[in-house]
Amino acid sequence: MQGDSLGGERYSTVSTFEFNEDGFERAVQAAAQAKAKEMQRQMDQFARQYKGRPVAVVKPALRRAWERDGRTITDPELTEYAAYISEGTPIRFEA
């Protein structure tokens, strides 16, 4: 394919692109698993620190931890997670 002129010289451009859907899905899944593993590690650490404390104490601390990492969480989810942490009920993240 003939291209445009660049400094008086003609040049050709050839472009090909193949999308590997299976490879893309594997990469996305691997990234999701890595993120879930990191979130699990953080949640386990947080839960050990706050286990047995009142929900009123756990909830604002959990919100700060969640938002510090740039994540968002709804108030109902926050309340549910805070109650689980207070009770000592494990929270599991999966990809």
Image (spheres, helix red, strand yellow):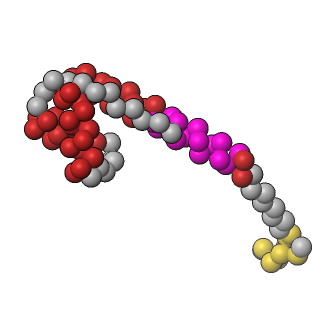
Which residue shows up at 65% across the image and 47% down it? 25
Residue 3 at x, y = what percent? 83, 75
Counting labels gives 0
Apparent side of residue 17 relative to residue 85 in the rendered image (left or right): right
Residue 84: in sight, yes or no? yes
Residue 34 falls within the magenta-colored stretch? yes
- In the orientation shown, which residue stands out farthest toward the top? 48
Majority secondary structure of magenta residues: helix
In this view of the protein, which residue sits in the foreground, 87 or 18?
A: 87
Q: Judge whether residue 64 can be spotted in this image.
A: no
Residue in view at x 28 percent, y 27 percent = 89
Location of the N terminus by quadrant is bottom right
State which quadrant residue 63 falls in.
Answer: top left
Could you tell whether 19 is left or right of 13 in the image? left
Q: To which quarter of the image does residue 60 belong?
A: top left
Magenta-colored stretch includes residue 37: no
Q: Is residue 95 above or below residue 48?
A: below
Residue 38 point in image, percent of width and height:
42, 32
The x, y position of residue 36, in whole percent, is: 45, 36
* Residue depicted at x 47% and y 36%: 94
Give the residue at x 46% y 31%.
37
How far across and down, in percent of the image, does residue 15 sit?
81, 64
The stretch of residues the image draws in magenta is 23-36
Side of 69 where 5 appears, left or right: right
Q: Residue furthest right?
A: 1
Q: Quadrant of residue 64?
A: top left
